[in-house]
Image (cartoon, rainbow, N blue to C red):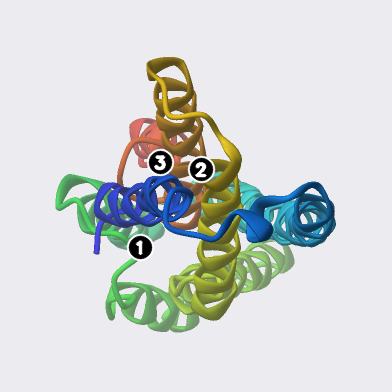
Amino acid sequence: MSPMEISAIVFACVFGGSIVGMLLRPILPQQHLNADTKDVIKLGVGLIGTMTALVLGLLVASAKGAYDTRRAELTQMAANTILLDRVLAHYGPETAEIRGLLKLAVANMINQIWAQGGEAPATPSSTREVLFDKLQELVPRTDAERLLQQQAETMAISIGQARWLLFEQSGSSISTPFLIVVVFWLSILFVSFGLFAPPNATVFVTLLVSAMSVAGAIFLIIELDRPFSGVIQISSAPLHNALAVLGK
């Protein structure tokens, strides 16, 4: 499901909880709503609220951490790609085909991740493997060329590792059971809000806005967890910048 669909479900659960609380209030016997009962309920709700805040904090930290890590890896890969192209340019004109393959690999990657609207990097193609084979086929004539070839091979391996790392990290970093438990706790909180809230327009609007805020927070968490699509996606600018200078 998309982040918008998930957040809509969360909103329905949370706001529905407040409506259930309002409907339960006139049904429950009066002794269930006395001062002592309210104190106990407040203690329980305070405990649930504290746990919810902690788990929500963990979810936000996990999603933000995964997002920042993938963005840093992508930027580093773009920088390494430019450096590899410069090393090949210094080697000599016999690396023209390899530099062309490198540029093609970057263009394919941009198309796979962003142009096609993919939620995660596609499986790395064989272009980089062909590129590495071509690097090994080079026949250096001087010590300087031999050193450049070794550096190019090391950089190619590093770029390949980063590409596979992005692919392996394409899964969700948000635990589904965590999310379900948080939504359940939030629903219980809103049931308690509705249970003791007077049924008037101000309370209704307040609970509505609060439920929308909670759903918005979940939406942001899910968006951060899917960094290559949606509203909060990682920019393709580093790879586009790299593509613009490759082969020159």
Name the quarter where the C terminus is drawn.
Answer: top left
* Label 1 SS: helix
The three-letter code of the residue at mark 3 reads Gln
Q: CA distance from mark 2 to mark 1?
A: 66 Å
Label 3 environment density (alpha carbons within 10 Å; few <14, some 14–19, many ≥20):
some
Residue displayed at 40% across by 83% down: 133
- What is the number of the mark on residue 86? none
Is 97 situated above or below 141? above
Residue contact between numbered discs 3 and 2, judged by CB atoms under 8 Å: no
The three-letter code of the residue at mark 1 reads Ile
* Label 3 SS: loop
Where residue 89 appears, as percent x and y from the top left, is 49, 46
- What is the number of the mark on residue 233? 3
> As rendered, which of 239 and 52 lies closer to the eye?
52
Residue occupying the far top of the picture:
202
Residue displayed at 44% across by 51% down: 14
* Label 2 SS: helix
Q: Nearer the viewer, mark 2 or mark 1?
A: 2
The residue that mark 2 highlights is 194
| Label located before the other in sequence (1 or 3) | 1
Q: CA distance from mark 1 to mark 3?
A: 31 Å
- What is the number of the mark on residue 98? 1
Where residue 238 appears, as percent x and y from the top left, is 47, 36
Is 76 situated above or below 136? above
The three-letter code of the residue at mark 2 reads Gly
Tell whether 121 sits left or right of 224.
Answer: left
Tell whether 214 sits left or right of 147.
Answer: left
| Quarter residue 216 falls in | top left
Label 2 environment density (alpha carbons within 10 Å; few <14, some 14–19, many ≥20):
many
| Label located before the other in sequence (2 or 1) | 1
Q: CA distance from mark 3 to mark 2?
A: 37 Å
The answer to whether residue 177 is seen in the rendering is: yes
